[in-house]
Image (cartoon, rainbow, N blue to C red):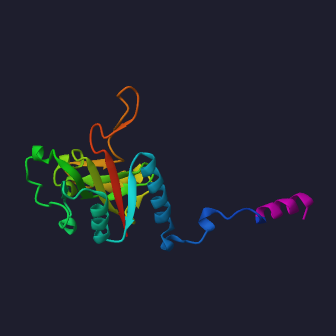
């Protein structure tokens, strides 16, 4: 073997493994952890916050400690009926003007931009997520996708009358070029990341 061939052979033997040569580790669910970490970072960077919870009882405890339960709280989740009204979905939307906190569930989250996909079947009324002082959204940790491309692949064939991606609290920079939270919607967003 020539010295050139010998050198090339040694280089070839010391190349990193190609992706196709790596073992399949998807059963470990590592992508979900990466997505979750990316989601948390992005959500906080756009003004939202998160709390990791094991169940609905943990959400109830958090709300009791951090929100004024004497004010009007509404939800579409029967599991939270102990702290929030669940019988408002057919009310006149104008009657929701005094809602302090709305709690709904999301279909899934998107790690790259910190958004959550919700549709009319989860909202009760469209206005419910835009009119309260504060908004809380429950999403399962396993229900995260990495990119908007994956999100659109996931919702592409679904049927719904209304759907929206919600990312962080309401924000605008129209007023004297300074960022204002809550000018056109919820002043704060908390995402409950559920096991």
Residue at the spot x=15%, y=60% of the render?
85
Q: What is the x, y in percent for residue 194?
A: 35, 66
Q: Is residue 64 left or right of residue 16?
A: left
**Residue at x 26% of width, y 55% of height:** 158
Question: Over which residues does the magenta segment extend?
Answer: 1-12
Helix, strand or loop: magenta stretch: helix
Q: Does residue 66 appear to the left or right of 74 in the view shown?
A: right
Residue 169 at least partly seen: yes
Quadrant in the picture for the C terminus: bottom left
User: Residue at image x 41%, y 58%?
Assistant: 145
Q: Residue 143's quadrant in the figure? A: bottom left
Q: Residue furthest right?
A: 3
Nearest the viewer among 148 and 190 is 190
On the image, the x and y values in percent for residue 24 come to 55, 71
- Where's residue 91, x and y in %? 8, 51
Q: Give the camera-side residue of 8 and 69.
A: 69
Q: Is residue 148 above or below residue 51?
A: above
Is residue 156 something one can see in this rendering?
A: no
Position of the N terminus by quadrant? bottom right
């Amino acid at each position: 073997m020539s010295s050139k061939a010998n050198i090339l052979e040694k280089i070839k033997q010391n190349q990193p493994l190609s992706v196709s040569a790596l073992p399949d580790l998807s059963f470990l669910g590592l992508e979900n952890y990466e997505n979750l970490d990316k989601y948390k970072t992005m959500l906080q960077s756009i003004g939202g916050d998160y709390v990791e919870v094991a169940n609905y009882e943990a959400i109830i405890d958090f709300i009791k400690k951090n929100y004024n339960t004497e004010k009007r709280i509404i939800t579409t989740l029967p599991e939270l009926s102990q702290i929030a009204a669940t019988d408002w979905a057919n009310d006149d939307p104008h009657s929701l003007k005094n809602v302090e906190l709305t709690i709904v569930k999301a279909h899934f989250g998107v790690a790259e931009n910190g958004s959550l996909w919700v549709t009319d079947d989860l909202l009760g009324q469209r206005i419910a997520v835009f009119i309260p002082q504060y908004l809380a959204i429950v999403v399962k940790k396993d229900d995260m996708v990495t990119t908007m491309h994956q999100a659109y692949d996931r919702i592409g064939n679904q049927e719904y009358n209304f759907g929206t991606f919600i990312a962080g609290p309401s924000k605008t920079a129209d007023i004297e070029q300074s960022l204002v939270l809550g000018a056109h919607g919820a002043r704060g967003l908390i995402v409950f990341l559920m096991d």
